Image (cartoon, rainbow, N blue to C red):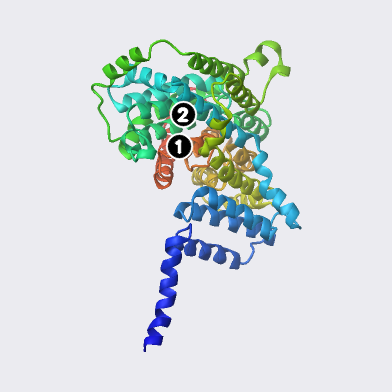
């Protein structure tokens, strides 16, 4: 009897031991493993290769593992890269597979994110970030929601001149937001992020996505969207900078106006009223005195970055002076290092930047490989054929088309990649389904959708991992708020298209 009890106790003891010492949560890990095995046992759908289906299974399992918090997100990303290399789902050899798995670590967008985080360290080190935060508090700090509107206004002012939403939201606005939160002692490291930082981080993120859709020059893939609209209409509908801004003005401003209020309900800050904040901020600004040398260098560096990100030299001297946003970011980082504003130890110790490099790189890699292996085109063709064969009304089909385009962004770690892979196919399907007199409103809804979908996940666009990486917003809250904001913004655009776009004579 004693031996039987010992036999029964050993597995449970072993389970408890591993539960205590292994770096992952066993129950979520078992669930994730079951998901992977189930997907791999499903017969490969027609139109896909076995390897393409296996890659999709690995990608979806990785997303499940991240949601269930099996391990830190960087570890899960590294595991996904290892599985891709071991299974050789992207190549015929392990050498080719590991090259594919590591390929995205050289992606300029990812390095733009990393360098933007490194540059933002200078704001904290020099004290300029704290000064800017105190300035915002002195102007709008009587209520937390007022500071939220200040962040939104900052995004709106910068958006027309900053073609990289990552550079704008992650490199310029986010450090200011962090400084404001720090001024109120709201810090993830001390468990006080809910005081104010969580709310302001969400405002930072969603103001970035809204303004990205308001101007042609507010994010990198927008010109590609313009090109696709022209192609699908045989060049009869072409958006200029002015017409884009005009068509998106009213719904965009409505979203920007309502967003801080909505977030105050969905993710309310613990500190809502700050009656003494204005006096406190003015006193602190007076105590800080005049700008120090490091602060002046930071201001000069940000001015340089803004001018280059806005392509001002190219506007003056011609296209030969146009610089890629990532190149500009490296220039800014180099300036800060050679002037002694930050040093190499600062660069090496910025853990969030290097963590982002790994996990975002892995997700971008899998999204790109899904495109290369034909999974994305398979899905697009399947959608087209299903809608054409369904017999549903064109209104229902058009609505479903927009929703599917938006929510398929859960499978993408780059807005540019998603638009490049799927938008033309979706627009072509829409042109075949919708009567000609209603085509333009559908096209504009797809334009709006191409940036609204940035709200969904912590890897949806380049700005997301920077803000998420700061630790103010838990993963579950990020996804929940992202979904609700996405639905809300789509509803605002759908409602206002019946009035604003009709007033402009578009249908």
248 sits to left or right of 112: left
Residue assigned mark 1? 470
Looking at the picture, how far across and down is residue 307, in whole percent? 59, 16
**In the rendering, which numbered label is found on residue 174?**
2
Q: Looking at the image, is mark 1 or mark 2 nearer the viewer?
A: 1
Task: Identify whether 276 is placed above or below 346.
Answer: above
- State the quadrant of the N terminus: bottom left
Task: Identify whether 15 is placed above or below 324.
Answer: below
Earlier residue among tags 1 and 2:
2
Q: Residue at x 70, y 49 (%)?
A: 100
Q: Do labels 1 and 2 touch, CB within 8 Å?
A: yes
293 sits to left or right of 180: right
Q: Is residue 365 visible?
A: yes
Looking at the picture, how far across and down is residue 35, in whole percent? 52, 63
In the depicted view, which residue is nearer to us: 369 or 216? Answer: 369
Q: Secondary structure at mark 2?
A: helix
Q: Quadrant of residue 206?
A: top left
Task: Identify whether 242 is placed above or below 175.
Answer: above
Q: Secondary structure at mark 1?
A: loop
């Amino acid at each position: 009897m004693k031996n039987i009890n010992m036999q029964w106790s050993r597995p449970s003891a072993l389970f408890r031991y591993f539960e205590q010492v292994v770096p992952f949560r066993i129950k979520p890990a078992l669930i994730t493993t079951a998901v992977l095995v189930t997907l791999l046992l499903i017969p490969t759908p027609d139109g896909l290769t076995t390897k393409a289906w296996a890659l999709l299974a690995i990608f979806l399992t990785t997303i499940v593992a991240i949601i269930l918090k099996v391990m830190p997100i960087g570890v899960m990303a590294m595991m996904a890269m290892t599985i891709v290399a071991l299974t050789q789902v992207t190549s015929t050899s392990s050498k080719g597979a590991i090259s594919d798995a590591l390929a995205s670590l050289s992606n300029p967008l990812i390095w733009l994110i990393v360098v933007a985080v490194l540059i933002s360290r200078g704001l904290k080190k020099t004290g300029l970030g704290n000064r800017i935060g105190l300035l915002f508090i002195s102007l709008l700090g009587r209520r937390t929601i007022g500071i939220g509107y200040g962040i939104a206004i900052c995004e709106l002012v910068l958006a027309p001149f900053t073609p990289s939403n990552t550079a704008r939201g992650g490199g310029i606005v986010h450090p200011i937001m962090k400084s404001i939160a720090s001024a109120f002692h709201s810090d993830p490291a001390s468990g006080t992020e809910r005081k104010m930082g969580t709310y302001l981080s969400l405002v930072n993120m969603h103001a970035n996505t809204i303004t990205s859709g308001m101007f042609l020059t507010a994010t990198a893939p927008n010109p590609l969207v313009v090109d696709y609209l022209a192609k699908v209409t045989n060049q009869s509908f072409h958006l200029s900078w002015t017409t884009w801004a005009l068509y998106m003005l009213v719904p965009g401003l409505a979203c920007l106006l309502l967003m801080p209020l909505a977030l105050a309900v969905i993710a309310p800050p613990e500190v809502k009223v700050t009656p003494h904040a204005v006096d406190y901020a003015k006193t602190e600004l007076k105590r800080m005195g005049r700008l120090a040398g490091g602060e002046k260098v930071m201001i000069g560096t940000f001015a340089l970055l803004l001018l280059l990100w806005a392509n001002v030299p190219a506007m003056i001297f011609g296209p030969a002076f146009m610089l890629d946003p990532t190149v500009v970011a490296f220039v800014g980082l180099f300036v800060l290092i050679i002037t002694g504003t930050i040093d190499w130890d600062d660069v090496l110790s910025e853990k969030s930047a290097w963590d982002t490099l790994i996990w975002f790189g892995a997700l971008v890699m899998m999204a790109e490989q899904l495109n290369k292996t034909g999974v994305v085109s398979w899905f697009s063709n399947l959608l087209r054929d299903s809608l054409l064969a369904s017999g549903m009304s064109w209104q229902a089909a058009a609505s479903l088309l927009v929703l599917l385009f938006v929510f398929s962004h859960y499978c993408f770690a780059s807005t540019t990649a998603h638009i490049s892979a799927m938008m033309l196919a979706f627009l072509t399907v829409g042109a075949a389904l919708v009567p000609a007199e209603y085509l333009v409103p559908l096209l504009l809804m797809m334009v709006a959708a191409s940036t609204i979908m940035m709200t969904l996940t912590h890897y949806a666009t380049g700005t997301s991992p920077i803000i998420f990486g700061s630790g103010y917003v838990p993963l579950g809250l990020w996804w929940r708020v992202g979904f609700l904001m996405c639905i809300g913004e789509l509803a605002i655009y759908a409602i206002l298209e019946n009035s604003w776009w009709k007033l402009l004579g578009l249908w």
